[in-house]
Image: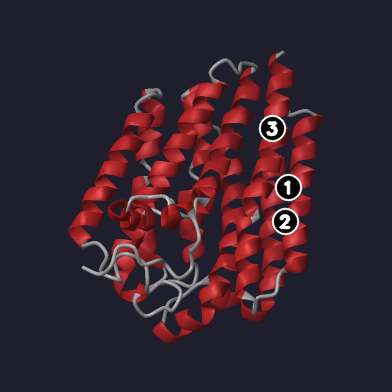
Amino acid sequence: MSDTSARVADSTGNWVDTLAPQWARPYLRVSRFDRPIGSWLLLMPCWWSAALAGAMAHDIRSLPLTIVLFLVGAFVMRGAGCTWNDITDRDLDAKVERTRSRPLPAGQITVKQALAFMIAQALIGLAVLLQFNRFAVATGIGSLMIVAIYPFMKRVTWWPQVFLGLAFSWGALMGFAVTFGRIDITALVLYAGSIAWVIGYDTIYAHQDSEDDALIGVKSTARLFGAHTHQALILFYGLAVMLIGVALASGDVRWPAWLGLAAFAVHLAWQIQRLRIDDPALCLRLFKSNRDAGLLLFAGLLADAVMRAA
């Protein structure tokens, strides 16, 4: 075993490095608790759907608890997913400059230890899921197959971001499953819009590793689009705004939700305008900024839900 205090190259100076007990650091890093942006991005579609479903039901009494449960669930299940991803990718990560210092390729923890930690996180996620109705429980469990196969997709397809979108957008279905005990066309369109959003922002993220990915044969939309990334982002971000707009129209939302969608769209346009695919640090900053984009949309949906329930 190597030194568990050794830092991960692409995540330094965070609370795990400075505050967490040394024995816990590899586990916190393998689940990405040192960089929670992915948890926030997983959470956003959950909160969107919860707010939109609450507005459509004209009843937000259970919405605060649902928001909290989704928050906890998103963080622990993203942690479990990242642990699984690192287990399956440990040999590839060892060949990439940005990822070779992660706990598994660096030898800070073993595969068995990582598997045990993944199961513990998944059990916490299950405990959260069991607070909802049976249909919501079944819907949540239904996402596990996508999560399981996602790490392998970059080996076989140029579109692994689509599979990430299928997994990270699942929350767009969960709010409706929790509120109504069903999934209707509004939820499905919101899900499709979120998938387009994920494809866009993860393409930006993947440009950090495009050179290393080319050397080791890993596929991504960043490599596929290359110099045409801006045009691809216009397509996918535009599709995201359009589909989410259709979902909002289907849900008969009021002006706060439309204002939130407009702010979301402006933020995505700003990302496209700012992007330089040969600047990894900028790519990371723009990728992370999608949390703010998602929160702008959520704020509008939440305001709409409160107004309609009054």
Question: Is 42 displayed left or right of 236 in the figure?
Answer: left
Name the quarter where the C terminus is drawn: top right
Label number found at residue 114? none
| Along the viewing direction, whichever of 117 and 141 lies nearer the viewer | 117
Q: Amino acid at mark 2?
A: Leu
Label number found at residue 301? 3
Count residues near mark 2 (Cα–Cα under 10 Å), then give few for <14, some for 14-19, many for 20+.
many
Residue 225, above or below 141: below
Mark 2 in CB contact with mark 1 (< 8 angstroms): yes
Q: CA distance from mark 2 to mark 3?
A: 18 Å
Which residue bears the numbered disc 1? 264
Question: Is 68 displayed left or right of 261 in the figure?
Answer: left
| Along the viewing direction, whichever of 290 and 49 lies nearer the viewer | 290
Count residues near mark 1 (Cα–Cα under 10 Å), then give few for <14, some for 14-19, many for 20+.
many
Count residues near mark 3 (Cα–Cα under 10 Å), then give few for <14, some for 14-19, many for 20+.
many
Q: Which residue, as the protein is rendered here, is positioned at the far bottom?
A: 215
Q: What residue is at 78 percent from the left and 66 percent from the top?
A: 273
Using the rendered image of the protein, determine whether residue 153 is visible from the camera's viewpoint: yes
Q: Amino acid at mark 1?
A: Phe
Which residue bears the numbered disc 2? 268
What x and y, as percent, mark residue 283?
63, 68
Q: What residue is at 32 percent from the left and 54 percent from the top?
A: 27
Q: CA distance from mark 1 to mark 3?
A: 12 Å
Q: What residue is at 21 percent from the left and 61 percent from the top?
A: 111
Residue 60 occupies which quadrant of the picture? Answer: top right
Q: Which residue, as the protein is rendered here, is positioned at the far top?
A: 310
* Chain-order first, disc 1 or disc 3: 1
| Along the viewing direction, whichever of 60 and 191 lies nearer the viewer | 60
Per the image, label 2 sits on a secondary structure element best described as helix
What x and y, as percent, mark residue 4?
30, 63
Per the image, label 1 sits on a secondary structure element best described as helix
Per the image, label 3 sits on a secondary structure element best described as helix
